[in-house]
Amino acid sequence: ENLPKVLIAFGSETGNAEAIARSLARKVKLCQPKVMSLNSVTKRVKSISREFTHFLAVCSTFGNGEPPSNAKMFFSNYDLGSIDTVSCVVLALGSSLYPMFCKAGKN
């Protein structure tokens, strides 16, 4: 079969983004998705385009528009030029009550 190879990554301080990422993984379980933190993606960015066809990122915003702790390395080091052949989607989470609503996901 020619199923998509899916990587679902999350940045989550309270667990909500991780729960959504894992829920998405269950919905596409036929594709046998891999789920990991955005920090873990940073360590593998060079091999992503060889291993995956689709990259879904679910990221919350913490504090004053900051990324969660398990995504900080990704945000400070990311160079996604090497995954330009991978279809990418971002789901940004946050509360519109805050001025930096969804800033981490937008970045």
Image (cartoon, grey):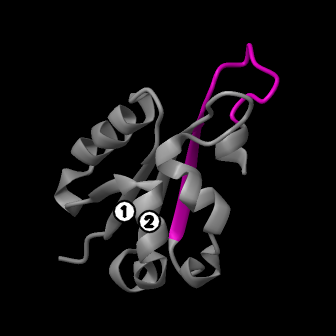
Farthest residue, direction right: 99
State the image coordinates of residue 100 (x, y, percent, origin top left).
78, 30
Mark 2 sits on what residue? Answer: 41
Residue drawn at x 75%, y 19% is: 98
Relative to 59, is 16 on the left or the right?
left
Residue drawn at x 19%, y 61% is: 32
Mark toward the viewer: 2 or 1:
2
Relative to 67, residue 45 above or below: below
Residue drawn at x 73%, y 28% is: 101
Q: Please tell me in which quadrant of the rendered image residue 26 appears.
A: top left
State the image coordinates of residue 15 (x, y, percent, origin top left).
38, 30
Is there a contact, CB below 8 Å, between mark 2 and mark 1?
yes
Relative to 87, is 1 on the left or the right?
left
Q: Which residue is nearer to you in this view: 56 or 38?
A: 38
Relative to 26, residue 30 above or below: below
The 10 Å Cα crowd at callout 2, few under 14, some 14 to 19, many 20 or more, is many
User: In whole angstroms, how far apart are the C-alphas of marks 2 and 1?
Assistant: 9 Å
Identify which amino acid the numbered label 2 is placed on.
Val
Relative to 41, residue 68 above or below: above
Residue drawn at x 60%, y 79% is: 84
For the N terminus, which image quadrant?
bottom left
Callout 2: SS? helix
State the image coordinates of residue 88 (x, y, percent, origin top left).
54, 63
The 10 Å Cα crowd at callout 1, few under 14, some 14 to 19, many 20 or more, is many
The dot on residue 7 is: 1
State the image coordinates of residue 62 (x, y, percent, origin top left).
62, 31
Provide the residue span drawn in magenta: 87-102
Callout 1: SS? strand
